[in-house]
Image: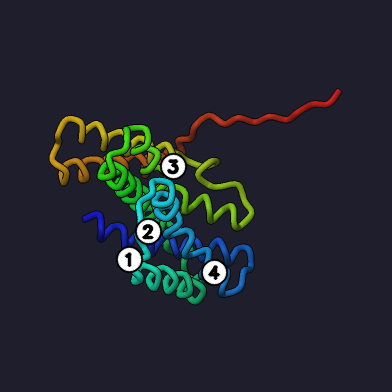
Amino acid sequence: MLTTIYLIAITAEAMSGALAAGRRSMDIFGVAVIAFVTALGGGTIRDMILGHFPIGWTQHPEYVYLVISAGLLTTLVARYMHHLKTVFLVLDAMGLIAFSLIGCGVALEMGYATPVVIMSGMITGIFGGILRDVLCNQVPVVFRHELYASVSLAVCALYLALHHFAVPEQINIAASFAAGLTLRLLAIWRGWRLPTFSYRERWE
């Protein structure tokens, strides 16, 4: 189940990266790079931090073809994509949850401690979007919009809690995925946000 969702998610993330590149009027090479980084950047950073080699996509070149093709295709159909905004939000939410669970699974298999497992899941879930926004010269969306990184944290924590109580893996994944997707979609629908911090230094 996670593999299928993963493929859908990296495709959707690549398309979101291409749209972000388009908003900055990048050339085709820039579009391809941003699409790639958005879709596969989180997993790459996770593998580098954990020492999980070889890095995932290097063993699956079809993922590279998929995300770059999705990014380039977006340049042809971008004018019609505003009709699919709701679909993209759902796909993005699914990707966030799937990436987070995959990241947790990788760290668990390598025997890391609980805090590292949670960070592994969050890095996988949110860092592609962070890299996209940094390269496009804007404050990362995950730090200033609806609950996003917090949803990844909650999913990772739930997954580990169920794992601790020896819940069968497939049931654990299904329950964590459903809970995380519900939380993310509710956050979008209701506009839930974390408190913000705004500071303006005053010079006397």
State which mark lies toward you, 2 or 4: 2
Between residues 111 and 64, which one lies in front from this camera angle? 111
Q: CA distance from mark 2 to mark 1?
A: 7 Å
Residue at disc 4, secondary structure: helix
Residue beneath the point at 56% across and 75% down: 28
Residue 54 picture location, percent across and down: 35, 59
Number of marks drawn:
4
**Amino acid type shown at disc 4:** Val
Q: Residues within 10 Å of mark 3 (few under 14, many from 20)?
A: many
Q: Are marks 2 and 1 in contact (CB under 8 Å)?
A: yes
Q: Which mark is residue 59?
A: 1
Q: Which mark is residue 148?
A: 3
Residue beneath the point at 42% across and 45% down: 123
Residue at disc 3, secondary structure: loop
Residue indicated by mark 2: 55
Between residues 127 and 199, which one lies in front from this camera angle? 127
Q: CA distance from mark 2 to mark 3?
A: 25 Å
